[in-house]
Image (tube, rainbow, N blue to C red):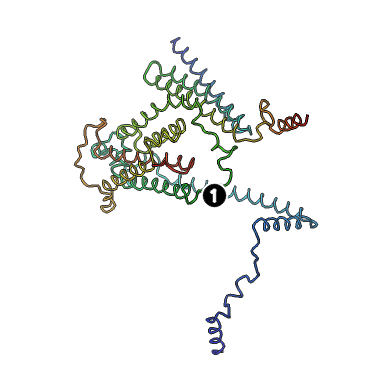
């Protein structure tokens, strides 16, 4: 018995024995060209369809599948609704005394203006009390831009992989919107107001609803309209990939230096020595305004980068 | 008192008009199958529906900065909505090869080729 086993091991070491032979599929798979394989599969399917009663079985199966599909969909919807309703039913009533939630909220509402200098309490929360959370969010945006760049960037290496006819008639890449006089006229009227509005939202984040994310989104949309109205070449004169990289890096690095330490102090920010200014003025709120600008720059670069990468496969040539 | 009632009447009329427009828009966008028909349905709400609801709000709020903002929104939307509709239509026109089946004014490319071939034969 023991000798037998030893013999087996010797044979396995020599490569004569495949111990996994009984579980691996030993059937020989020939390397058929893809087109031929497809045709074979289609022929096999047709042959199956020709046999008696095949169509009946298939339609019954299909019917059963759709019935099951509907039943499962309804059941899962009802389960989800039930879970959500149960959760909502267990929430504390609106305005009810609840020490767990009221403690934090009342601190924010009562002392927010005094401690952060921001009239808009939401801004005070996301960029002062919980600035580390927003730090992560802006890095998520940057990571998303990197992923899109990995997938869609076109350069010399992958240029040959483009499917034939990708730029031909019948695709939307063929229709160049920038040649349209209507787009130019509309852009000339709308762009100044859009950029002005974006800057207003960005700089006024501590005083009114708005801030980095919404202002940056408006400015990114303005950049996209600019690119589609006057062509990518016009945007490339002032906003290339290098500029985008520098702006994003400087903003994220500034944010990380300013607020990165709160990860180690348990979200307790150090004392702020930047004067908070008079509440309601543009230059108020201490660190909130620079952080807002940093977030807005990242968001604008990311939005324009998405559009540019999806449309032509690069953010702009240097 | 009479002035208030007249204002209420104007506001109610325009609100109901906008409601009718938006209902038509929603039904059209969901029931039509073709892009151009859907765009037409969407245009009803985007132009007349939006304007009437904003006009009703302007009348209701009286002469204030707020009403000016409402009118500004209307002007902005009337600038941007037709432009975007135009580009949607252009892209559909350029990318849909079977558009002639839907639109009467667009000739069948196949027919043209057949006619050309006949002319060449002659």
Q: Is residue A41 above or below residue A272?
A: below
Q: What percent of the width, then of the height, locates residue A46?
A: 75, 55
Q: Position of residue B62 (x, y in %)?
A: 40, 16
In the rendered image, the vertical position of residue B104 relative to residue A73, given as above or below: above
With B71 as the anchor, is A18 left or right in this view?
Answer: right
To which residue does mark 1 refer?
Answer: A79
Q: Nearer the viewer, residue B111 or B72?
A: B111
Q: Is residue A271 left or right of residue B63?
A: left
Front-lying residue, A128 or A246 = A246
Q: Give residue B46's position: percent from left, percent from top.
A: 52, 26
Q: Nearer the viewer, residue B112 or A14?
A: B112
Vertical position of residue B52 compared to residue A82: above or below:
above
Within 10 Å of disc 1 (Cα), the crowding (few <14, some 14-19, many 20+) is: few
Name the quadrant containing residue A126: top left
Find residue A154 and report its horizontal and vertical position in percent: 47, 47
Name the subunit of mark 1: A
Q: Judge by depth and name the residue closer to the eye, A245 or A222.
A: A245
Local secondary structure at mark 1: helix
State which quarter of the image contains the N terminus of chain A: bottom right
């Amino acid at each position: 018995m023991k000798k037998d086993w030893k013999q087996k091991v010797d044979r396995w070491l020599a490569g004569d024995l495949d111990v996994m032979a009984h579980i691996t599929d030993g059937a020989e798979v020939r390397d058929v060209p893809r087109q031929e394989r497809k045709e074979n599969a289609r022929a096999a399917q047709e042959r199956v369809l020709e046999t008696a009663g095949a169509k009946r079985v298939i339609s019954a199966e299909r019917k059963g599948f759709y019935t099951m599909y509907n039943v499962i969909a309804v059941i899962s919807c009802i389960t989800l609704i039930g879970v959500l309703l149960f959760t909502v039913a267990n929430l504390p009533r609106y305005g009810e005394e609840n020490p767990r939630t009221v403690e934090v909220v009342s601190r924010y509402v009562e002392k927010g203006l005094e401690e952060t200098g921001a009239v808009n309490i939401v801004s005070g929360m996301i960029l002062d009390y919980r600035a580390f959370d927003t730090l992560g969010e802006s890095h998520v945006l940057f990571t998303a831009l990197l992923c899109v760049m990995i997938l869609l960037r076109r350069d010399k290496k992958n240029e040959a992989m483009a499917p034939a006819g990708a730029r031909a008639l019948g695709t939307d890449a063929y229709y160049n919107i920038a040649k349209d006089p209507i787009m130019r006229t509309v852009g000339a009227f709308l762009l100044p107001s859009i950029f002005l509005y974006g800057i207003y939202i960005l700089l006024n984040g501590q005083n009114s609803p708005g801030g980095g994310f919404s202002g940056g989104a408006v400015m990114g949309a303005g950049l996209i309209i600019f690119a589609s109205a006057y062509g990518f070449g016009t945007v490339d004169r002032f906003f290339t990939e290098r500029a985008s990289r520098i702006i994003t890096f400087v903003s994220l690095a500034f944010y990380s230096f300013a607020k990165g330490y709160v990860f180690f102090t348990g979200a307790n920010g150090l004392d702020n020595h930047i004067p908070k200014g008079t509440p309601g003025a543009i230059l108020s709120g201490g660190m909130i305004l620079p952080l807002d600008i940093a977030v807005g720059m990242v968001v604008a670069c990311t939005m324009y980068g998405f559009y540019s990468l999806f449309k032509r496969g690069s953010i702009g040539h240097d | 008192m009479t002035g208030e009632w007249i204002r209420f009447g104007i506001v109610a009329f325009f609100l109901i008009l906008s409601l009718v427009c938006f209902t038509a828009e929603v039904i059209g966008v969901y029931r039509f199958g073709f892009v151009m028909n859907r765009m037409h349905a969407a245009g009803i709400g985007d132009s007349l529906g939006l304007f009437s609801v904003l006009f009703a709000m302007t009348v209701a709020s009286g002469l204030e900065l707020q009403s000016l903002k409402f009118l500004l929104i209307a002007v902005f939307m009337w600038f941007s909505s037709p432009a975007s509709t135009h580009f949607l239509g252009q892209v559909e026109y350029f990318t849909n090869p079977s558009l002639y089946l839907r639109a009467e004014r667009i000739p069948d490319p196949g027919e043209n080729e057949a006619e050309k071939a006949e002319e060449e034969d002659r």
